[in-house]
């Protein structure tokens, strides 16, 4: 019995991997769960009622659900969070109850059904962070419906609710307690090897007959697309196909993909200014500064990891800071990783909590990209704890910087600041110029 199950698991995993490239442990966990539920062999008397898929947009959450439904013959009812909300009193709750009843009917018919709630944070936000009555009522209704999902005696089917979000912290905490969303699965941006496999699948599906595998070095493209999700890679392939058509050629070339890569911005970086760094060392006269730049670049090349750099240039010397940052980025990136410039004044907001939220969004994107050079100008505007209204922002910055210190993130974090920096934050910067 166990051997039959393992063979079936490997067979289904092999079929699904031709369409969805994810880590083996993620696929095994999800596919294994649904196979056991279909067989009625789940080892516990109370199988999971809810699964939370979370991760950046474009990492395969919805695609995996569609593929599972096709390959395993699972009945699926889909709710797209924002679309179910109505302006009329009680209508949203009625729609939600109707979707649950529809999924329960599928479960009785097929033995197993899934209610897939895309962008679940839109209908179940944290109640302590919203003011509207509708949101609180809707969260309460969803909690009540999930609590009623226990498999009753004599029922032939099992129903699972899968919620999908790229903002798990925005969900009401009551949903993430045992008995509701029992299982959480993280979808991370693909590694270089996974990006190569995704490109293979995308080219086969979207450019069949329009490329020659022997003429394209997918490994090279995969290395140069740090931070790209599956959706970003699809955009890259479409851009390359467009370039091929405009040239009047039959086949995609390596040059088409390289040029497309330069024009497609990974979704994690959209909204920030991406720049092509230049080696401006010839414009820097101070030998001590040039020596320090060489030390930073050499240190990163020998031991890639989180590299914080503080540039203490004020007044007219701020232009020199721009030259130093660009030179460090050029010598580290060589166009193999993105370089983006952020003015920290853009994080500031007069609305309560908005500054902290913007800072969290920024650092979470840095985590997703994994390898990049970020240049933050006027860093002291978000790193000055002497301003009482900025203390929350300073705590966010400090928490993420110390988190990066203990992670494998390969981020060169260049900050231009002169004074008034929080001492705990200043202590992180091992590299200081001048």
Image (cartoon, grey):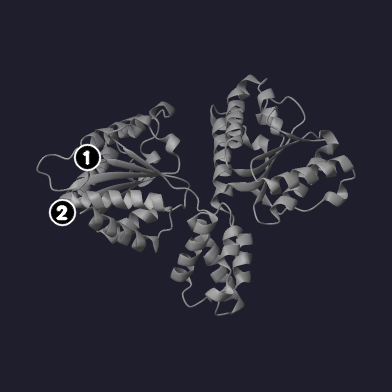
Quadrant location of the N terminus in the rendered image: bottom left
Q: Which mark is residue 109?
A: 2
Q: Are marks 1 and 2 in contact (CB under 8 Å)?
A: no
What x and y, as percent, mark residue 79?
32, 48
Residue pointed to by mark 1 = 44
Q: Quadrant of the C terminus?
A: top right
Image coordinates of residue 333 in percent, x first then y, are 69, 53
Q: Nearer the viewer, residue 144 or 16?
A: 16
Q: Can see residue 74?
A: no
N-term-proximal mark, 1 vs 2: 1
Give percent across and percent down for residue 336.
65, 56
Q: Position of residue 335 (x, y in %)?
A: 68, 57
Element under disc 2:
helix
Most distant residue in the left direction: 154
Q: Residue at x 58, y 46 (%)?
A: 370
- Mark drawn on residue 394: none
Image quadrant where residue 375 sits: top right
Separation of disc 1 and disc 2 at Cα?
A: 23 Å
Is residue 426 something one can see in this rendering? yes
In-front residue for pair 181/92: 181
Mark 1 element type: loop
Q: Is residue 318 left or right of residue 19?
A: right
45 horizontally vs 381: left or right:
left
Circle 1 or circle 2, nearest the eye: 1
- Residue count near mark 2 (Cα–Cα under 10 Å), binned few <14, some 14–19, many ≥20: few
Numbered circles on residues, count: 2
């Amino acid at each position: 019995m166990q051997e039959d199950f393992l063979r079936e698991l490997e067979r289904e995993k092999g079929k699904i991997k031709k369409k969805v490239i994810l880590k083996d442990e993620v696929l095994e966990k999800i596919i294994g769960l649904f196979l056991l539920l279909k067989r009625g062999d789940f080892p516990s008397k109370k199988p999971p009622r809810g699964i939370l898929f979370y991760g950046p947009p474009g990492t395969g959450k919805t695609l995996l659900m569609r593929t599972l439904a096709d390959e395993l013959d699972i009945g699926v009812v889909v709710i797209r969070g924002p679309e179910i909300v109505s302006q009329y009193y009680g209508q949203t709750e009625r729609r939600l109850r109707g979707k649950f009843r529809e999924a329960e009917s599928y479960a009785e018919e097929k033995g197993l059904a899934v209610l897939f709630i895309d962008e679940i944070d839109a209908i179940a936000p944290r109640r302590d962070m919203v003011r509207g009555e509708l949101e609180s009522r809707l969260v309460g209704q969803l909690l009540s419906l999930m609590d009623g999902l226990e498999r009753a005696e004599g029922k032939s089917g099992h129903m699972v609710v899968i919620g999908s979000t790229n903002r798990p912290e925005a969900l009401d905490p009551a949903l993430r307690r045992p008995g509701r969303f029992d299982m959480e699965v993280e979808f991370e941006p693909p590694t270089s090897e996974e990006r190569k496999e995704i490109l293979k699948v995308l080219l086969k599906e979207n450019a069949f007959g329009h490329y020659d595998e022997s003429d394209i070095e997918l490994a090279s493209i995969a290395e140069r697309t740090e931070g790209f999700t599956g959706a970003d890679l699809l955009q890259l392939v479409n851009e390359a196909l467009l370039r091929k058509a405009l040239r009047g050629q039959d086949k995609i070339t390596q040059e088409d993909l390289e040029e497309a890569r330069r024009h497609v911005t990974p979704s994690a970086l959209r909204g920030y200014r991406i720049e092509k760094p230049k080696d401006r060392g010839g414009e820097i006269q101070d030998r001590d500064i040039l020596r320090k730049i060489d030390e930073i670049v050499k240190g990163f090349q020998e031991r890639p990891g989180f590299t914080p750099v503080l540039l203490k240039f004020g007044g007219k010397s701020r232009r020199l800071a721009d030259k130093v940052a660009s030179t460090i980025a050029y010598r580290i990136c060589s166009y193999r990783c993105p370089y983006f410039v952020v003015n920290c004044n853009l994080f500031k907001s007069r609305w309560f909590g908005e500054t902290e939220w913007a800072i969290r969004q920024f650092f979470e994107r840095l985590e997703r990209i994994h390898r990049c050079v970020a240049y933050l100008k006027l860093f002291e505007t978000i790193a000055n704890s002497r301003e009482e209204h900025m203390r929350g922002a300073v705590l966010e910055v400090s928490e993420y910087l110390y988190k990066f210190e203990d992670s494998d993130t390969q981020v060169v974090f260049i900050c231009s600041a002169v004074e008034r920096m929080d001492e705990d934050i200043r202590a992180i910067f091992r590299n200081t110029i001048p």
